Image: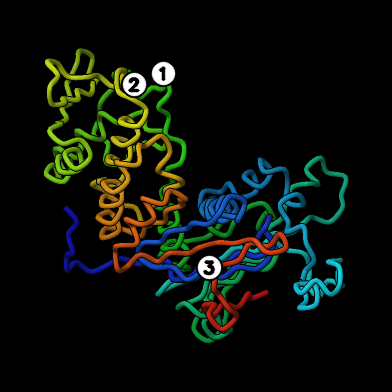
Amino acid sequence: MPFRGHRERPFMLKTLAVANYRSINKLVIPLGRLNLITGPNGSGKSNLYRALRLLAETAQGGVVNALAREGGLDSTFWAGPEHISRRMRNGEVPIEATVRQGVKRLRLGFAGEDFSYCIALGLPEKTLSCFSLDPEIKKECIWSGPFYRPASLLVDRDGPMIRAREGRGWEVLARHTPNFDSLFDQVGSFRTSPEVMQLREFIRRWRFYDHFRSDADAPVRQPQLGTRTPVLHHDGRDLAAALQTIREIGDPEALQTAISDAFPGARLSIAPLQGGRFAIEFYQEGLLRPLSAAELSDGTLRYLLLVAALLTPRPPSLMVLNEPETSLHPDLLPALARLIIRASEQCQVWVVSHARRLISALQQDEECNCIVLEKTLGQTGIVGQRMLDEPAWYWPD
């Protein structure tokens, strides 16, 4: 089923950097086409995933609200000392607060082959406003290439001012940017700042799947109104329409192969009902009638949801799957791995998992970038990564 085409690969992330977020004090991660994030419980997988979601919110105008839902910026800061000394690590001295060398900021960023971006958020100055706990965007930068240098800086946001490089000088794009709005909300046009528009659209095409509903009352278990659906909804409610869209304008052979790979002898059909609704009909060997979505087990239904997400006719720039093995029988995981590997030929993929069979199957692919997390003295790190192994990264502020 997997194929290795010769198509030109689109822009993808090369590096992810996170600082001062929950269990992540400082972390710089090299990324590839297929990224597998694993590690024991409590090692920081969920925090890394949430940091990536926060980055995605910058282009949607929701990063401040997302932090508020997490309890506010102050509660998301790294709770340990700014620096853990060698003597602290060796247990020679107790872990205690050190004199802070820099301002307290939550920093998120990524580097790509063409453009890179970072954002720094901090606490506001004390005021009488009822919104005095809202975080403020202190700094945002876009630069060309994967490595930051002052000469490569293209767009710079410092407090309320946003400026873009114009020849050898700078053009001010905005002077009074609200401290709760990202530069992606305020500027971005072909004429003045095409890189802002390009990056904004790139981030908006990131796709996260971690809340598929398969309970008895889930909308996906009932016939739903069917319209062309090249992108599956994040909770999977439009599964029938998404599967039919794959059959008509996607890769129907890959769809049937994915079904047969997991359930030998099975086939899938989508039945149009009155009122423009679609219903799933799942035929299995030995049964005299098809099963409806309401009759499918949680595992079977979740597998179909993952099939629809991974075989999308409109691939995202980044697809993120958080613990896709949930509710799946271990025997389904090799088939799921083959689907994920196939999808990684169309877009960059990020998988968070601790299922051994899925991890083992994904690692069979030569492009699988396996990142094993660990926690030492409360701090998330990458197993085996030393200082010289880190990708080059420099925070502009």
Query: Mark 3 sits on what residue?
Result: 117
Q: Going 44% across and 71% down the picture, which residue do you hit?
A: 14
* Residue drawn at point x = 29 percent, y = 18 percent: 295
Residue labelled with disc 2:
221
Corner quadrant of residue 268: top left
Q: Is residue 274 left or right of residue 390?
A: left
CB-based contact (under 8 Å), mark 2 and mark 1: yes
Of callouts 2 and 3, the N-terminal one: 3
Instruction: Name the disc covering residue 216, or none.
Output: 1
Nearer the observer: mark 2 or 3; the answer is 2
Lower position in the chain sequence, tag 2 or tag 1: 1
- Label 1, secondary structure: give it: loop
Residue at x-position 66% and y-position 47%:
67
Amino acid at pointer 2 = Arg
SS class, disc 2: helix
Above/below status of 346 relative to 154: above
Q: Amino acid type of disc 3? A: Tyr
